[in-house]
Image (spheres, rainbow, N blue to C red):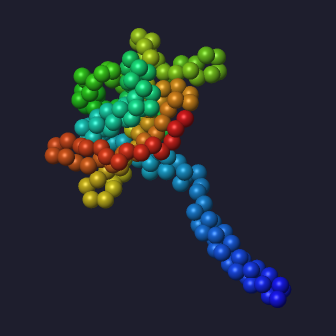
Amino acid sequence: MRTTIALVLTATLASPLHAQRDSSARQRFDSVALDTLFNGPPYVFTGAEDSLLLARMFQETFKLGLGDAGAGNGPAVLCLGVGRDHPSDAPASVLRLLANHRPPVRPASACRHVSRGDRPVGVRESATGAPAWTMTIQSLSRGSGDTLIVYSYHYVAPLWAAGWVCRALPSGHDWRLVGCSMTWIS
């Protein structure tokens, strides 16, 4: 009797374990899949992107970053860029749309990463030395219908940065960002 129960248990337990092993193998992530998950699909900015969409995403990225940092820990300047591996300056049309933003905005090239020795310590506006954050829109992709998916991040210093993905919905002649979620944090 004990032998029969042992055989039944062995046969019963072996099948689910085998199925679990198969399902986990199908969900293996490689470095490209992880990069896309965190930073969005590869995208090359052409300059033809909707400036108002980019401006709204920069505003939302700042709001999300400030929520993490706390109101008293905001920067004196925001430096804005677009692109993934080597971001370039945000378009001048975006900077004009955000001309009255507080804190003031500058192109990404107006800021520099500061180090002490070999250790990075933060971001400063080059002209004034004021504390800054860099904010970068990395990728745009089509969602369902007329929804766009926008990936961005803010960087303050090592271990003080985060990436975000938001859905952008057209709203008349404007954009509304909804469903934002953090994709990574440092």
| Residue furthest to the left | 172
Q: Quadrant of residue 67?
A: top left
Q: Nearer the viewer, residue 112 or 21?
A: 21
14 lies left or right of 133: right
Residue 119 appears left or right of 175:
right
Q: In which image quadrant can residue 19 be found?
A: bottom right
Q: Residue at x 55, y 35 (%)?
A: 186
User: Is 68 positioned to the left or the right of 94 in the image?
Assistant: right
Q: Nearer the viewer, residue 81 or 175?
A: 175
Q: Is residue 57 above or below residue 95?
A: below
Tell me what residue is drawn at x 27 percent, y 40 percent: 53
User: Picture coordinates of residue 123 (x, y %)?
Assistant: 48, 21
Q: Residue 89: tell me if it is visible.
A: no
Quadrant of image for the N terminus: bottom right
- Relative vertical location of residue 41 with respect to residue 78 in this rendering, above or below: below
Residue 100 in sight: yes
Q: Residue at x 31, y 50 (%)?
A: 148
**Which image quarter: residue 135?**
top left
